[in-house]
Image: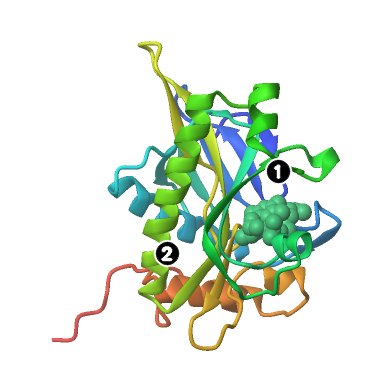
Amino acid sequence: MVKGRRLYEGKAKILYEGPEAGTVVVHFKDDATAFNGEKFDVIEGKGVLNNRISEFMFTRLREMGLNTSFIKRLNMREQLHKQVEIIPLEVIVRNIAAGSICKRLGLKEGERLPRAIVEFCYKKDELGDPLVAEEHINAFGWAEPRELDDMIHMALRTNDILSGLFAGIGIRLVDFKLEFGREYSPDGMVRTVLTDEISPDSCRLWDMKTDEKLDKDRFRRDLGGLVDAYAEVARRLGIINDSNPGGTGPKLVKG
Ligand code: TMP
Ligand code: ASP
């Protein structure tokens, strides 16, 4: 696979021009950052696991009819996506109180919220991605009203699908962050598509029995064991197994 020019380097991923026009290659790094890049470390193996887990999530969502930019995984660290114009918002869905909503509203971590809550943050590193209201999004034109409706609808549908999927493997989907883009088709249509990644870097995942954290809070809160936790998620999803930590390749059949 021939990668093109480097288009953009983010905190955990690098984007390259794809092999064909209108495609990009997403490369998952081992870099871990938190608190808007203040805390930084390189955690060997994280990129490979996030690549596999995110591939799994996007594939399931696509099967359920969601528009996504994901095309296919290319190798252990890279995947091919359709190139989209990024909508400058982070869309957060919360089922259980954790993280910033606890500080903001004085909630106790672990409290179930009255219903799933969708929040928007404006993607602006210099400002630390501040929480914004629909009023700001409309007034500043960061997204069209139709796109806002699409994002809320798609975020809640993603929540339903992924909550069920994780519940099936004994994991509570506490909250997660999504990003969306605009796909321009040749006929002049603009579609809202789910893009970026869905991985333990962008979700809070708690073991249902023990409440053990299986996500990036292990790094944010200096709990250690991040790769083991991500590998546990991948193992329960059936992406990796103990005899073949690299993936589900051909299985040895005993005769
Ligand atoms: P928060 O509680 O810190 O606002 O995070 C809510 C969810 O969004 C949590 O699952 C982590 C995820 N998240 C990101 O993926 N990127 C970010 O930059 C932030 C702040 C949160
Ligand atoms: N991703 C953000 C950062 O790198 C924040 C976070 O995930 O906690 O700082």
Tell me if 232 is positioned left or right of 136 in this view.
Answer: left
Observer able to see residue 221:
yes
The residue tagged 2 is 163
Between 132 and 171, the one nearer to me in the picture? 132
> In the image, is residue 177 above or below residue 182?
below
Q: Amino acid at mark 1?
A: Gly
Q: Pinpoint residue 155: horizontal percent, then vertical percent.
A: 47, 47
What is the quadrant of the C terminus in the image? bottom left
Tell me if 212 is positioned left or right of 11 in this view.
Answer: left
- Residue at left offset 40%, top offset 82%: 243
Q: Quadrant of ligand 1?
A: bottom right
Disc nearer the start of the sequence (2/1): 1
Asked which quadrant contains residue 82, the reply is top left
Q: Pinpoint residue 252: horizontal percent, then vertical percent.
A: 25, 79
Q: Amino acid at mark 2?
A: Ser
The residue tagged 1 is 10
Asked which quadrant contains residue 137, the reply is top right
> In the image, is residue 134 above or below residue 114?
above
Tell me if 47 is positioned left or right of 172 in this view.
Answer: right
Q: Residues within 10 Å of mark 1 (few under 14, many from 20)?
A: few
Discs 2, 1 touching: Cβ within 8 Å: no
User: Most extreme residue toward the top, as rendered?
Assistant: 187
Tell me if 216 is positioned left or right of 58 in this view.
Answer: right
